[in-house]
Amino acid sequence: MKIAISISGDHINAAFDPRFGRAPTFCLVDSESGAWSIHPNPAISSSGGAGIQAAQHIAKLGVQAVISGAFGPNAAQTLEAAGIKMFIAPTDESLTAAEVMQRFKSGQLSQIDQATHRGYHERSHG
Amino acid sequence: MIIAIASGKGGTGKTAIATSLALAAKRPLRFLDCDVEAPNAALFLKPKLEHRKPVGIPIPVIDEELCSYCGRCAAVCEFHAIAIMGNKSLIFPELCHGCGSCTLICPEHAIRERIDTIGVLEGGSALPEIQFAQGILNIGEPMAVPVIRELKKWSFPSPTGQINPIEQTSPASSNGLEIRDAPPGASCPVVETLRGADFAILVTEPTPFGYHDLRQVVEICRDLNIPAGVIINRDGIGEKTVEEFCASEGLPILMRIPLQRNLAQALAQGETIYTADVRFRAPFEQLLTKIRGIGHV
Ligand code: SF4
Ligand code: SF4
């Protein structure tokens, strides 16, 4: 299974970043082989709809699950439509992507099926 | 001539100044309260609001029968208001700016538009010849700009005849006067209010906050190429940074309004500066002449 983890950095040992839409990069890990790659988040500087944009991006990368610290309603809806499972990793332990992956494999992360927060003030004043 | 009155932050007495100018200026004139999130000029000018017009934006609706899930609509939307995931389409109306790009680009003509109401315009007259209009954004609705844009364009009937938008010309021209009370801040709604104005009156206070916010609005005026002048409210309460900034930027100081208890009380009761204190009559009456002079330079 291919899994995306929101991180800030360019290595599997870089820090986990709990902000799904605003994380600088995603680390893609193949849970069977352990192979990983880094993908910049195109939504990082968008003025609104970051969660949707990030979700569309990782869907294009062909992942089946995503691990972050929180998902807004729009991101959750988009990920759900793409059939991508959402998992929450702890935000208070300064984990690396590799450590997050370990916890995922040992079944310590909880899966969610809806938004963890009500979203931010999304529509910019255009 | 179109004059916009702006201030970086709220609570600088901007509306009291805008309404004072309306009372002092030669009428007829058109007054627009563009602070659509919290319009309050009506409290000062007490218009009879007789006309209403809802403002909406077109939101796309995708016909699943026709859609081929090609994803072009999602790709063209710069606000990420559409997501096409496999063969599911998602629309996020609260992100949509109603620009119509998605409808235009759809190769299957699968998108039609429905109108979502986001606010309302209200208009009428205040005193015989102040043609007053305000925009009101629905509570919780984040997009002020379309309401302000419609407000600027709105023509409505009045006892003195049809009220039409005034053309942007030059500060010196005499094709009528429009006064726009801008929202506080320095974001898109302020830009939209200032756009098309011939002159901007920037209201500030001689404090570090006042200075910081003034700089931001001055920048917008520069970008839009609108000449501006400054009114210092609560003059004498603080330091000289604002004055030094104005001097170095070549911004004329149009008026100083000292901190006075009687003014504060009058404003709290919905009175304008112009009516509350006779000493301000002449300065407000001369304000337009001053501005016309600056416009000529
Ligand atoms: S552009 Fe038209 S056909 Fe393509 S996904 Fe959007 S609505 Fe469907
Ligand atoms: S109308 Fe414009 S902003 Fe709205 S969804 Fe279509 S492209 Fe995006």
Image (cartoon, helix red, strand yellow):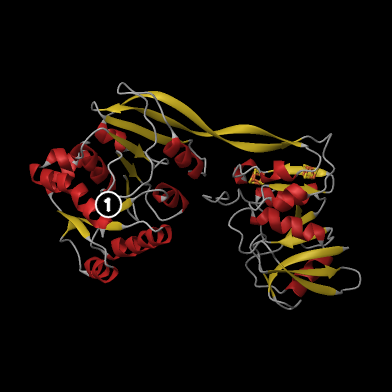
Specify the farthest residue to the right.
A32
Badge count: 1
Q: Quickly name the residue at label 1.
A: B12
- Between B170 and B286, the residue placed more toward the observer is B170
Q: Which image quarter holds the N terminus of chain A?
A: bottom right
> What's the amino acid at mark 1?
Thr
Q: Chain of mark 1?
A: B
| Residue B252 visible in the picture | yes
- Between A92 and A3, the residue placed more toward the observer is A3
Question: Residue B159 at x, y = what percent?
Answer: 31, 21
Question: Residue B237 at x, y = what percent?
Answer: 17, 61
Question: Residue B226 at x, y = what percent?
Answer: 36, 56
B286, above or below B122, in the image: below
Mark 1, residues whose alpha carbon is within 10 Å: few (<14), some, or many (≥20)?
many
Ligand 2, image quadrant it occupies:
top right
B286, above or below A55, in the image: above
* Residue depicted at 23% across the width and 52% down the height: B291
Which corner quadrant of the image does residue A19 belong to?
bottom right
The local secondary structure at tag 1 comes to: loop
Horizontal side of residue B253 vs B149, given as left or right = left
